[in-house]
Amino acid sequence: MKRIIITEFMDEAAVAQLRAAHDVTYDPKLVDDGARLHAEAAGADAIIVRNRTQVRGELLVSLARCQVVGRLGVGLDNIDVAACEARGMRVIPATGANALSVAEYVIAAAMLLLRGAYRSTDAVASGGWPRNALSNGRELGGKTLGLAGFGSIGQFTSRLARALGMEVVAYDAMLGPNDPVFAAAGVACVGLDDLVARADVVSLHVPLVDSTRNLFGAERIGAMKAGAVLINTARGGIVDERAVAGALRSGRLGGAALDVFDVEPLPAQPHFEGCPNLLLTPHVAGVTRESNERVSSLVTAKVLEALR
Ligand SMILES: NC(=O)c1ccc[n+]([C@@H]2O[C@H](COP(=O)([O-])OP(=O)(O)OC[C@H]3O[C@@H](n4cnc5c(N)ncnc54)[C@H](O)[C@@H]3O)[C@@H](O)[C@H]2O)c1
């Protein structure tokens, strides 16, 4: 029997499956208690985390006997993968398991922001009738979606978008234009500048690495089509949040949805107050009941296999 610690929330059925085979500490608040986290880490053969536990530096030192890091999600920017591998620890992400949740979030956000008519509840309920003001919304069908990053989530999103009649163009720094993945998806591979100039909706699906930090700064946002919509479900730090606020206020951007932020939880941000057509969510694009089950069961199966 091995010792497993789980430091953030996980599907209970998957936790029970792990408990049936091993000695498990499951505490979704462990991530917030540094001293206890380090003490628990010292005895762990496996650690399972989401995106908040920083598996690097001192925690890695505490994880002296750990063989496996299960990641309940896909971004690995909270894990020093090279250092883990140098210590013989396997890092196991839940590749693909939350792609549908993120893709649906992107499509819903794009529709909501293009149409701009769904926030009239208070006005209508209180006897207002802002029909003229809200009759200028745009349709999603026939518009161009630009996907920066064409991995698991980018490809899933392209499928939903094409089914709704969008044209899809994509940029991926690691995939050449002749990569069969583009033709199979019916998506045109373009350069990033071209994508930004053509897309009515730009959605980001790249990992946070040195080359993607501030990829969408003021200059690139300023090069987007007038009135275009920007959606970031990838990672904070890829988009300049102040530049988004400025472009929404100036009318350069027609809307924006940000699910991820440079600092999370996001402290109060005066520059976002009163920004038109801005949707902010607390890093939930990939988190639904269904994806939590899929992510947890996939990581459970792989961690059990790795500990065998
Ligand atoms: N908001 C959420 O809840 C949520 C949920 C899941 C994933 N994410 C984020 O979404 C990102 C993408 O997830 P995925 O499952 O599609 O990952 P993935 O690894 O399948 O795809 C990422 C793609 O980005 C490409 N890429 C790498 N560096 C690039 C660069 N410099 N420029 C352009 N493309 C580059 C890769 O070639 C790859 O095709 C994750 O890294 C994660 O940070 C967020």
Image: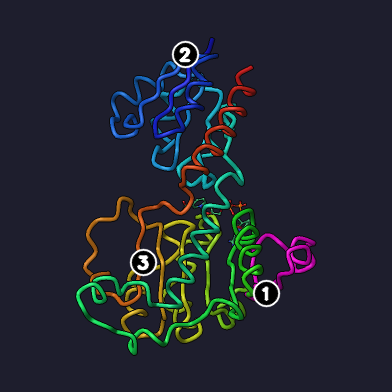
Q: Where's the C terminus, which quadrant? A: top right
Q: Where's the N terminus, which quadrant? A: top right
Viewed as shown, does residue 249 lie left or right of 137? left
Return the disc, 1 or 2, that comes first in the chain's sequence.
Answer: 2
Q: Are marks 1 and 3 in contact (CB under 8 Å)?
A: no
Q: Please state the total of marks drawn on the protein image.
A: 3
For label 1, the SS is loop
Cα separation between marks 3 and 2: 42 Å
Residue 214 at x, y percent in the picture: 45, 66
Residue 58 at x, y percent in the picture: 38, 31
Q: Quadrant of ligand 1?
A: bottom right
Q: Residues within 10 Å of mark 3 (few under 14, many from 20)?
A: some
Q: Residues within 10 Å of mark 2 (few under 14, many from 20)?
A: some
Q: Which image quadrant for residue 63?
A: top left
Q: Are marks 1 and 2 in contact (CB under 8 Å)?
A: no
Q: How is the image coloured?
A: rainbow
The magenta stretch spans which residues?
A: 166-190
For label 2, the SS is strand
Identify which amino acid the numbered label 3 is placed on: Leu
Q: Does the residue tagged 1 have its C-beta within 8 Å of any atom of ligand 1? A: no
Identify which amino acid the numbered label 2 is placed on: Asp
Identify which amino acid the numbered label 1 is placed on: Val
Rendered image: mark on residue 190: 1
Viewed as shown, does residue 258 lie left or right of 149? left
Return the disc, 3 or 2, that comes first in the chain's sequence.
Answer: 2
